[in-house]
Structure formats: structure tokens, C-alpha cells
Amino acid sequence: MKVYLRAQKNTLMKIWTAKDLLYATLEFKAMVPNSNHWNENSLNYNKPRLIRLRRLNVLLNAFELTRSSKQKASIWSLVEGKAKIKESELIKNEITPFLNGDFIIKRQSTDYPKLKKFIEEKKEFNWESFGLIDICSFYRHLIQFRMKAYNLLQHNNEVIEASGLGLRSAIKIVGEFNSDLYEKIKQTDMLLLDIIDPKGLSFDEEVIIKKHGFPRENLNEIDMENY
């Protein structure tokens, strides 16, 4: 999953891909399941989660997966006067729109030739025609499944200490099941990544730090300090 590029003074700089973005989103969603907390005010007390939120917002912007001004304005007009939502919080949370596939609407169905072929193979009626709406519904259903699968794949990680024959046996069974599931889930990831990033973009971390304000903090160190 992680690819590195050697820079000056033997410093290792990460190359960020859409796969990194997808996995970071799945991790964040599992850590902070309540989408009402996907804002800086709610996560200010928890630095590991706050840095992850900031990273995701930067990556979503770099990969051009944020909403357009028109989309933001449209959403704001729907809730204005009907709910007490701060505009700054509404427009800063780009994770929910990303999971909803709002970015797809900014594109063309011709951006997805491989997906078109894959979806049309499931046709039941000749009159059905492929369009952006099909990509949206395909993506939304698949990413919901992927988020649930992520939690299954992390199940054994919740066990800190395995004592007793019964627990060790259960952990082994879950591990074997998850190993099979992970192999099968790879196709799901490939389909999601084709939708998220049909151009195959990647970014040197130093570039997104300078251009997009990517957080410089060492997340591994922050996790250890807040364990």
C-alpha cells in the first residue's frame, strides 16, 4: 500500500495514491463512526483523529474529489432556515459527500470505459442505457459494503491479549475467514479506485504539503503519544 521516494539528505517521502486515500477514509470512518463529529470542533480534543480529518480533507481536495461551489450552494440552500448548522462546518466536511459519490456528478460517463463494460454485462433489459446515475448507485452500494467489510477485517485487532483455548481458537477461525475475505475484497477495491481516480493520479507528500497544506505532523508518533 505504501510507496516511498528517496529525496535529499536520505529523507523518505511518501507518494500518496487514491488507494491510500480510500484506506485512510475507511480507517477514519471506523474510528469516528458518527458523521456529526466529522468537523474540527468535535475532534479538537483528540489529536490523532483531528490530524486524520485534516489529512483527508487535503487529499480529497488534491484528488479533485470535493464538491463544486455550485454543489455546496445547492446543499446550503436546502438546509438554510431549517436546521441550525454552521456554514463553515457544512462546507468543511467533504468526507460525507465523498462517500455519497458527489464527485461523480462533476465528471462524464465517458471517463469510465472499463466500468461501463463491467456494468453493462449485468444488463437485464436491452433498453437500459449506461450513465452517471449508474456509476453513482454502483459506487454508493459498493463503498457501503466496503466499510462494513473493513470492520470485519479489523475484528481480531480488537483483542489485546488472547488467553484461553476457546478465544485463541476463535481468533484463528476469524483470521482464516478474513484472509479469504481480503483476497476477494481486492476486486471491490479495484472497482472503487477506478471510480475515485480514473486518471491514476499520485502526489509526492512534499508537494501536497506546500500546495495543499497537508499536515506535517508524524501521525505514528502522535498515535504513540496518545495511546
Image: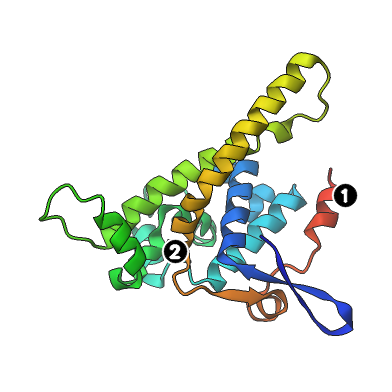
**What residue did someone put label 1 on?**
225
Instruction: Give the alpha-carbon distance from disc 1 to disc 2, as whole Å.
Output: 36 Å
Left or right: where does residue 167 sit relative to residue 177?
A: right
Q: Amino acid at mark 2?
A: Asp
Which residue is more in the foreground, 204 or 181?
181
Disc number lying in front (1 or 2): 2
Q: Which residue sits at x=70%, y=32%?
A: 156
* Picture residue at 70% right of the left edge, 27% below the top: 172
Please provide percent x and percent y for residue 132. 28, 62
Circle 1: residue type = Glu
57, 107: nearer the viewer: 107
Q: Nearer the viewer, residue 51 or 104?
A: 104
Q: At 17% from the left edge and 60% from the top edge, which residue is drawn?
A: 129
Can residue 169 be spotted in the picture?
A: yes
Q: Nearer the viewer, residue 28 or 178?
A: 178
Q: Which residue is mark 2?
A: 194
Quadrant occupied by the N terminus: bottom right
- Name the residue: 42% across, 62% down: 195
Q: Residue furthest bottom?
A: 8
Residue closest to the far left = 127
Count of numbered circles in the view:
2
Q: Quadrant of the C terminus?
A: top right
Q: Quadrant of residue 176?
A: top right
Q: Secondary structure at mark 2?
A: helix
The image shows residue 185, relative to residue 136, as above or below, that is above
Name the spot of residue 149 as percent of width and height, x first. Answer: 54, 39
Q: Residues within 10 Å of mark 1 (few under 14, many from 20)?
A: few
Relative to 112, say whether 192 is above or below. Answer: above
| Residue 85, visible in the rendered structure | no
Q: Which mark is residue 32?
A: none
Q: Judge from the rendering whether residue 193 lies leftward or rightward of residue 76; answer left or right.
A: right
